[in-house]
Amino acid sequence: MPRSRIGICMLALGSLLGTQAARAEDFVIETPAGPVTISLDHAGPQGSLVQGGAPSSPAFRPPSIFSAPLPSGSGARALGLAGAFTAVADDATAASWNPAGLIQLERPEASVMLRASRERNAYNSDSDAFRVGVNSYDDENLNYLSCAYPLTLLNRNVVLSINYQEAYDFNQRFSAAASEGRPPSSSASTETRVDTSTQVDHFENELDEGVTASITFVTHLTTRHTSALRELLQADLVNDLEFEQEGIIDAVTPAMAVEILPQLSLGLAVNMYQDSALHGIRSKTTASYTGSSTLDSAAQETRVTSSTYEYEGLIRYPPPFPEIPFSSSGEFPDFTDSSTSGDTSGVVVDGVYEEENVLDDLRGFNTTLGLLWTVSRFLSLGGSVDLPWVADAEQTKTIRDTATTYNAARTRVLDRSSTESLVSKDVEITFPAYFALGAVWRWTDRLYTSLDVSQTLWSDFAFQADGEEKINPLDGSPRGENPLDDTWAVRSGIEYLLVFPRVEIPLRAGVAWEERPAIGEPDEYWSASVGTGIALGREPARWILDAAYVFTQGDDVLGSLVTDQDLRTDVTEHQFFVSCIKHF
């Protein structure tokens, strides 16, 4: 059979086999924003191009929180004590740690704090096909800004303050290279077609002088065509993954403290959250991929023809002899004809998938309640509750995908495609409540130690897009399927004050252990901090400068960063805080 007919046969079967092959060439790229499915083009029978579908992206998910937010506080002095500040809370940052502590401010003051950080993430994966390394990134931000004013109201001491604080940090970087090869998959299909025909032939022959024969010959033909196609498909995909996320949720916080008794004060802060104008919340995932597929195909065409015949006729003699009729039937032997053809074809696909998520107009508020009890001149106790809150925002997801398909030798472009889609939805993020209890023991007028124990109810953490169900923000699973555990933290600090005639220099240090939310069990982090400062001048015009350094280490953490890849990360974080307080 000519090769063109074999090709027609193969193409006739291509729709079925092409569908099977397309399903076999779906590759899933695991990203911090969720799994992305890439469906490659592939070669069909006789080199025809079978195009895959557009990449499928995950449903709406929020920018991921890969570390717990700042522990409800800020400031160089507090963080020099590793955050064990709930029962100390005697400067303007008290509004974020324990607003009741504002009552200890005796003069009007203004303060500003800056933060600089550097984080190094060393990734490990047991999968040879998922290659990861080290990512480092820096971040600087205004950490805190405040003004406080003490006054007397209804014969009670009251302190009012207005504060700006950074609350949630979304900054993260991640890169990886992954490869996935599929074992050869085979498919086969057979198509059978039966054709029938009838042929009638009429013959007139002169047998002898005056003798003729008239014959009608009828042939019935039945031809069975059997077309068989077998395919062996092999495909692989290599991708380079880049993920960048940035953003800050900050808060403007009016706060007040009221002296209930000489030893007891209560505080209230109202936190009005918004996405930072300088650090909008956005994440970008870029997957550059190269995929190839090779198809070995073989076709066989077989024709088996069977036939029967029948005939009838008359032999005519000269008169007076009569006509003699005759007839008969029978069958011919079957006739078989077959041919085979094979072909190997392949394609290479280069593509780039980009997904960008942006949160705009984020708004929300909650309250922080505080209590400070001076039990004695040696012991003070403090407590604070940061109530849960819901952030409303608009999320815009933009997806861009470009792909170019070449022949196996990359000498000819078979197809180019480029798509872009943009979807915006209203979303809600439910943030958890936070509780803290603290104690401070004053050994002398110049030496004290502090201790804080806190809990964050991450089990309430949830995300919901308009028209969709609530999900777990860490992995996108339906809420309740992979519940998050509540997390604990323990912090301890010490401060010793060096006093000179016109200068005071504090020496601070602290250690902390904390849990941060993760799929399965919480991640554990340890941190150590040191701090110092200097107080210049005398009241009322006194300047206080403070600085702190915090080192944080987490081993085998961030497993929620990319699910289904057994990813483990060793995190090392260096943070520097500088603050300036001016008394009036």
Image (spheres, rainbow, N blue to C red):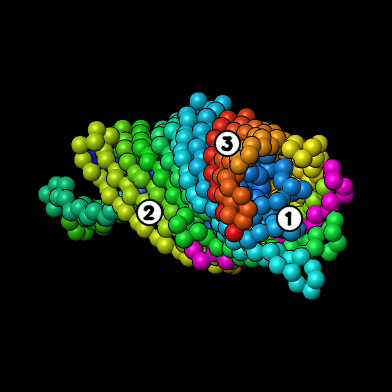
Secondary structure type for disc 1: helix
- Tell me the number on the disc at residue 104: 1
The reply to whether callout 2 and callout 3 are in contact (CB within 8 Å) is no
- Tell me the number on the disc at residue 400: 2
- Rendered residue at 22%/55% (across/down): 202
Which label's residue is closer to the chain start, 3 or 1? 1
- Tell me the number on the disc at residue 549: 3
Q: Position of residue 466 (x, y in %)?
A: 58, 67
Which label's residue is closer to the chain start, 2 or 3? 2
Q: CA distance from mark 2 to mark 3?
A: 42 Å
Q: Answer above or below: position of 68 versus 409.
A: below
Farthest-out residue, front: 501
The magenta span reads 359-379
- Rendered residue at 52%/60% (across/down): 275
- Rendered residue at 81%/40% (across/down): 441
Q: In the image, 90: left or right of 260?
A: left
Looking at the image, is mark 2 or mark 3 nearer the viewer? 3
Q: Amino acid at mark 2?
A: Arg
Q: CA distance from mark 2 to mark 1?
A: 55 Å
Q: CA distance from mark 3 to mark 1?
A: 26 Å
The reply to whether callout 2 and callout 1 are in contact (CB within 8 Å) is no
Which label's residue is closer to the chain start, 2 or 1? 1
